[in-house]
Amino acid sequence: MKSPGAKAPQIADQDLPLQRLYRWERTLPDHVIMTQPFDGGQLRDTTWREMVDQARRMATFLKSHGWPQDSRIAILGKNSAEWLIADFAIWMAGYVSVPLYPMQSADNVGYALSHSEAVACFIGKLDDTNLLQGIDASVLTIALPLAPASVIASSAVYWPDVLAQHEPLQGEPVRPGDDLATIVYTSGTTGQGKGVMHTFETLTAICMATLAVLKLPPGGRTLSYLPLAHIMERSSIEIGMLHRADGHGYFAESLATFADDLRRARPTMFVSVPRLWQKLQQGVLERVPQHKLSRLLKVPLLGGMVRRKILRGLGLDQAIYCVSGSAPLSIEIIQWFAALGLPIAEGYGLTEVANASHIGRPGDLHFGTVGQPVEGVGQRIDPATDEVQVLSPGATVGYYREPQLTQELFTADGWLHTGDTGVIDANGCLRIVGRIKDNFKSSKGKYVAPAPIEHKLSQHPAVETCIVIGGNLPQPIAVVVLNDVARASLAASLAQLGAEFEAHLKRINAGLDPHERLDCIVLTTVPWTVESGMLTPTMKARRPKIEQSYAPFMEAWIKAGLAVVWAQN
């Protein structure tokens, strides 16, 4: 199975996932590769030998059902060691894994299971057991050790029981590079997600291409907390550990314990998203106001001590490479962390290219860009639409059961449409401008790209997230969700915050064309969440849902004639 969008990657058989897994089982059997916290901070280490033994036993169980080759088996749950072991077991048994986000609706779970024709589903740690309503009775359920008690009681099979009752699968069953390994459902910002198909080759090729340009030292530690159902985390953690076998991966137990989990792991490589970088910054500034911090950092010896203390308190004092992805990170936050001695690279990629197509190089970061293409990836800008197009060895082999959409994903000469607009600078670095499908036409017939305006809006330290709306309106308007720090101090700073955003609006409008200028900024204290349908499981804004929610109020906001409007929450 070859991608219509790229040449077949030159991947040696010994570099494919299962081959790597067996290699470390033989050569590094007692190396602790994962540490799992549970029950309020207890820790469980897992060695390569233990991990592969469990995968072999589970593979024996899966094969005992006699399902046809390439049958689909889903994994629904928050990150854990068993999540990864289940994936390896699925592959060993000759099947295809379908990761599902643990933060989505039961309807979406049901759609993915039905569309992929899954025969079984592993269920792990969940915050919301209502998701289980999306699992049809015909689907075999297997409860992982950290699954809720109600899930363990109701599931057909419990993980420890399988391990106790089945012998390990013998030998080293492998899969060809062009075998289908996984179907990853996109989070769907505008509609139902699509099932992106990846082979063992495409998963391996893009991971190796990324590691080739990063040139990280041997070993290292990671913390896995972003959803493993997302291709970025899965490639970085799962495929990455198969190629950096002497490393050590840690998991986060919960949101409440995240700070302790991060300090325990002290990762040498840390991959995150803009929202967390912002929260880490806010946490520091709550203890040390910016004016005081700026003054301390200027003192020669004291400044170094302050930097080390802050990074040690965050758990990032050992980080040699940090990456932000999923959405643009403001330059101000990047510069703020750089002043602490923690450079953050930005990366860019799609589920359709199995993780990153671009990433900033250690020691050669170009702020405001997502860096240069990783090894073997081509980039170009369509002169007619300004769309970024890539040619990647990690390109998907297509959308599952969607041949027409697969055909539309690629250009006539085999490049992949990203759907994003961008600019390539003199250094070959890519700057993402916006999303083509997000552009809208005002009632004056002028097109507006919201992403650059949203990026300017997000520079205000009180902004958690925002969206620019303007389809069929005379002028665009912005809706801004205040972050938790701003919400906590709102009673005492209402007038001041309003004045700050009025000044912020003037500065933004001064740099925009007349048809792009914002009519007003609407402030709201109600966060957008996955549960409310405002955000995707990867924390991207669902524009149609948000616009629909605020549509009844837009006319009144515009008629008010105010620069800053407070939403009636």
Image (cartoon, rainbow, N blue to C red):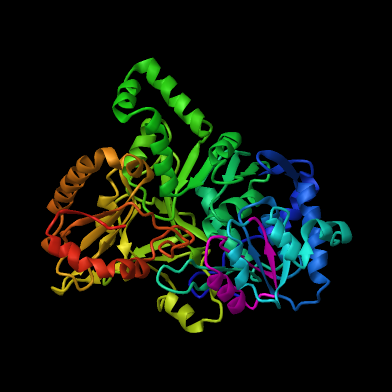
The magenta stretch is 96-125
Toward the viewer: 328 or 522?
522
Depicted 299 relative to depicted 225: above or below = above
Number of disc labels:
0
Residue ID at (45%, 69%):
188
Choose between 443 and 63: the one closer to the eye: 443
Q: Name, please, the residue furthest toward the top.
A: 301
Q: In which quarter of the image is the C terminus?
A: bottom left
Q: Is residue 511 left or right of residue 241?
A: left
Q: Quadrant of residue 291?
A: top left
Q: Does 375 appear in magenta?
A: no
Q: Position of residue 388 (x, y in %)?
A: 35, 64
Placement of 228 over or under 28, stated as above or below: below
The one of 138 and 368 positioned closer to us in this rendering: 138
Q: What is the quadrant of residue 183 in the picture?
A: bottom right
Quick one: quadrant of the N terminus?
Answer: bottom right
Where's residue 45, x and y in %? 73, 42
Q: Position of residue 172 (x, y in %)?
A: 80, 61
420 or 441, nearer to the observer = 441
Q: In this view, does 273 lie to the left or right of 178?
A: left
Q: Looking at the image, can residue 33 be seen?
A: yes
Residue 536 placement (x, y as % from top left): 45, 63
Inspect this view and state whether residue 88 appears.
no
**In this rendering, would 5 be left or right of 244?**
left
